[in-house]
Image (cartoon, rainbow, N blue to C red):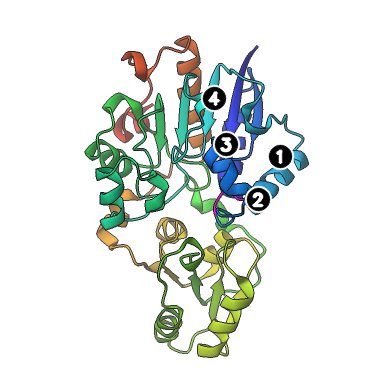
Amino acid sequence: MKRALFICGSLNQTRQLHAVARELRDVRAFFTPYYGDNTVELMRKLRLIELTIGGNKRRGWCFDYLRREGLDLDANGRNGPYDLVVTCTDMVVPRNVRSQPLVVVQEGILDPDGWLAAACRALPLLPRWFAGTALTGESFLYDRFCVASEGYRERLLAHGAEAHAIVVTGIPGFDDCTRYLQNDFPLRGYVLVCTSDTRETFKFDNRQKLVERAVRIAGGRPLLFKLHPNENAERSRREILRYAPHATVYADGNTEEMIANCDVLVTQWSSTVFVGMALGKTVHSNFPMAELERLMPWQNGGTAAARIARVCRELLASEGVGRRAGHRLHAVPNEREARAS
């Protein structure tokens, strides 16, 4: 039986890769939290990347999930090589998997381009992750990159990706948003604000401006805030209630179900805007609406994990010959063909 290593990250990324692994019943799957080479590991031990998926906190959350689900562990892929590696991002690609067939699965929305992304592209010595997730897909160390939509495929092609390597599959978690309509969340008819961990990832965030904007949008309607899991919850709660004392603040709970029951969704840089759009909500975002509509993840009835698994099987069947040898597989290359399959 062939073996595959799944390099996980946040809980959302881990659940997505677990969904793909469940579709690969003929492959023995092993799992690891996100990891890197010596520099990344040193930064983790010194707690310099604690607010990222490479930090100890999220690594612990990932281990907890994997153990709770009874999955086979191989921390940092030490028991390789593997017949296939599936990872949640290519922002860091560990050297011990670079010679193996590699599939990347997009998690959600990507940071916008800006001066920092341009600097990272122009100066190869700067790590791609300096620009947040803006340079996702630009390592070109993968054989296949499974993306959420044709819009994201076009984005990667514009930045130099090879056409055959970018496959529109949709992504688990964002491919069947109507399922969130059946839920037990007790509230209805409110304005929901999904905040971002902007400050925790060393970007500027005017929290007062966001809260005051949300109060204006609510116009007297009930106002709920759902904090990002990576936020400093105590600080955020204190700030929100200072400017919106009648708001309700949730640090935990199912965000998608909260979106399903709201009338209006307000976001900053969050992927949750796609859930609101898919469910026909009135949405507000820091991203331009035209761009969001172009990038909107394909709603394929919850088949994204199976489609990604198909890409993995085709790469396995090629006996490791992928992008690096210029071998083109018969994976679905665009949304139009995927819809017809």
Residue 252 in view here: yes
> What secondary structure is marked by label 2?
helix
User: What residue is disc 3 on?
Assistant: 17
User: Contact (CB < 8 A) between labels 1 and 4?
Assistant: no
User: What residue is disc 2 on?
Assistant: 56
Q: Which of marks 3 and 4 is nearer the N terminus?
A: 3
Residue 253 vs residue 251, the one in the foreground: 251
Q: Nearer the viewer, mark 1 or mark 2?
A: 2
> What secondary structure is marked by label 3?
helix
Q: Nearer the viewer, mark 1 or mark 4?
A: 4
User: What residue is disc 1 on?
Assistant: 66
Residue for point 44% across, 83% down: 208
Q: Does the magenta stretch include residue 27?
A: no
Residue for point 42% across, 45% down: 299
Q: Is residue 110 left or right of residue 196?
A: left
Distance, label 1 to label 4, CA atoms, is: 21 Å
Q: Is residue 53 magenta?
A: yes
User: What residue is disc 4 on?
Assistant: 96
Distance, label 3 to label 4, CA atoms, is: 19 Å
Residue 54 in view here: no
Residue 221 vs residue 269, the one in the foreground: 269
Q: Which of marks 2 and 4 is nearer the N terminus?
A: 2
Q: Is residue 24 left or right of residue 124?
A: right
Query: Residues in magenta?
Result: 52-56
142 shown above or below 267: above
Distance, label 2 to label 3, CA atoms, is: 20 Å
Distance, label 1 to label 3, CA atoms, is: 11 Å
Residue for point 22% across, 39% down: 158
